[in-house]
Amino acid sequence: MAVTTLSKAQLSYEWIKERISDGTFVPGYRLVLGQIAKELDVSAVPVREAVRMLEAEGLVTFERNVGAQVALIKETEYLHTMQTLAIVEGAATALSAPFVSAADIARARAINAEMIACLEHFDPPRFTQLNLDFHSVLFENCPNPHILDLVHRGWNRMRVLRDSTFSFVPGRARESVEEHEALLQLLERGADDLEIELAARAHRTATLDAFLAYQSHKKGPA
């Protein structure tokens, strides 16, 4: 019985999380457990368990007299995380550059080609995973383990805050893959460390700027 309940809870978890990731359930959306249970043809018990799992990940909040709802993006926390990630990932990419081989660049370019293909039928979670795969090729050779640890922490924090920023600013995705190619060309021609670091940093902050512009537009004029 416990196995069955866990299986249904996992099914409910994946179903809800997918809809949060693709923007179907927007921040602030109220999750009506009975309605979801009916949709999935399960009891409310596994749905409640799924909501607890999502709450632990920071994707759902639960308030008395309000119920469960998709967590509002904490704009300040997102801002600070992205600013920090831009700095440490830029440094890691520059330090990693001398150790990035032609084979690494070819692998990164192949990943970027997958990201371009993904644009036609846009899948934000898939695009985000490919984005991490791409950047990992560029920063994982960083010889400074402390900086590399900060980069990993930044990416993990971003995953908790929001599975995919690109769900909200899909137009940014096309610009992103173009900037990826520019980064690869810098590595291929052996650009100096500072140029690579600044380019990698600007690439990250451009995504942040696009998201903040989206948030500002959504709020409307003061």
Image: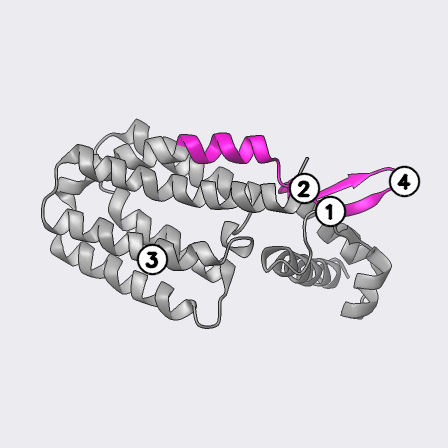
Spatial CA distance of label 2 from label 4 is 17 Å
**3 or 4: mark nearer the eye:** 3
Q: SS for tag 4?
A: loop
- Is 60 one of the magenta-colored residues? yes
Spatial CA distance of label 3 from label 4 is 44 Å
Mark 2: amino acid:
Leu
In the image, farthest residue toward the front: 221
**2 or 4: mark nearer the eye:** 2
Mark 3 in CB contact with mark 1 (< 8 angstroms): no
Tell me which label, 2 or 3, sits earlier in the chain. 2
Label 2 CA crowd tier, 10 Å (few <14, some 14–19, many 20+): some
Mark 3 in CB contact with mark 4 (< 8 angstroms): no
In the image, farthest residue toward the left: 189
At horizontal 37% and vertical 70% (from top left) the residue drawn is: 117
**4 or 1: mark nearer the eye:** 1
Q: Which residues are magenta?
A: 56-84
In the picture of the structure, the residue carrying the numbered disc 4 is: 65
In the picture of the structure, the residue carrying the numbered disc 1 is: 28
